[in-house]
Amino acid sequence: MPFYDYYGERAATAAGIGWVRAQARYVLDRLMQASPSAASLLEIGPGRGVFADACRQHHVRYCALDINIRLLRGLADRSHNGMQARATQIPCADEMFDITFASHVIEHSPAYNDALAFLEEMRRVAKRGGLVAIVAPDYLALREDFWNCDYSHSFVTTRRRLRQMYHDTGLTILDECNLYGPLTGIVGWCAGQTFGGHVMGMIARTVPGIVGEKLYKLRLTFAGAILMIGRVAG
């Protein structure tokens, strides 16, 4: 799909890659704390493979799922396993993975029934007692930039809405927190209010050229996102 090519072709800065890696390590640590014996993980929407690299470092058996063959080839070149399919039609048997994980994917669902189907598929292929984990942008932090930053954003995500979805999918919430790029807690909140805040977005949209684009990326990086971890009934 060409949309995903747009992001695949965008050059990443060294700082940006470092921030993404730090967040990946933090999220994986939270997952392993919730399920210390977990040995396998399916990631839907692997992007550049940063989370795949974190799993390899933790000796977690990793598999990616994506619709974009170019992203999957990039992962294969680095010896990561992957399969091409839609997130609502995972070509796996029931209860195959200890953890299913998706970062910044569910908000691309066209409507609430698609988002629920997405989450239900993640639950289906997770083992009994396994984890289903989502990272999603917080609409209450992004506001108009939820729509402006990405033309395929369709399903609004907030912490309250994700809680409701987890409940209706039969998942017990074990852990949830706000993420601000690589930061969390009070330091992250401060970064979210400044670098990731509404004022930064307004400034970035008025500054032309590459400077405005970099400021906008800063806004998107540090605006609040939500990590939610749920357990499948045992």
Image (cartoon, rainbow, N blue to C red):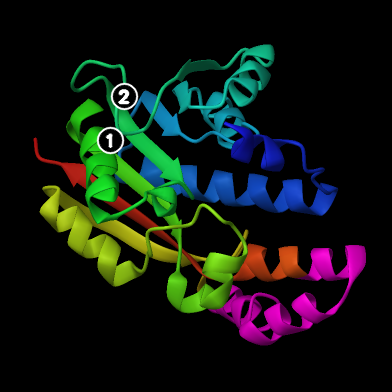
Query: Would residue 140 be found to the left or right of residue 148 on screen?
Result: left
Q: Is residue 25 left or right of residue 85?
A: right
Which residue is depicted at the point 62% across and 31% down? 49
Q: How dense is the environment of label 2, judged by Cα within 10 Å: few (below 14), some, or many (20 and up)?
A: some
Residue at position x 70%, y 41% from top? 6
Answer whether residue 210 is magenta in the image.
yes
Q: Nearer the viewer, residue 159 or 105?
A: 105
Based on the displayed image, in which of its 4 quarters is residue 60 positioned?
Answer: top left
Foreground residue, 122 or 1?
1
Extent of the magenta region:
186-215
Quadrant the N terminus occupies: top right
Instruction: Report whether residue 10 is seen.
Output: yes
Question: On the image, numbered disc 1 is attached to which residue?
Answer: 122
Kindly indicate whether the residue at mark 1 contacts the one at mark 2 (C-beta within 8 angstroms).
yes
Mark toward the start of the polypeptide (2 vs 1): 2
Which residue is farthest bottom? 199
Residue on which the image places disc 2: 90
Quarter of the image where the C terminus is located: top left
User: For this rendering, which residue is in front, 151 or 142?
Assistant: 151
Figure check: 216 above or below 186: above
What kind of element bears circle 1? helix
Amino acid tagged 1: Met
Q: Position of residue 33 (x, y in %)?
A: 36, 45
Q: Residue at x 62, y 84 (%)?
A: 198
How far across and how far down the image is residue 211, in percent? Answer: 90, 68
Decide: is 74 above or below 212: above
Is residue 37 visible in the rendered image? The answer is: no
x and y, in percent, of residue 28 in the image: 47, 42
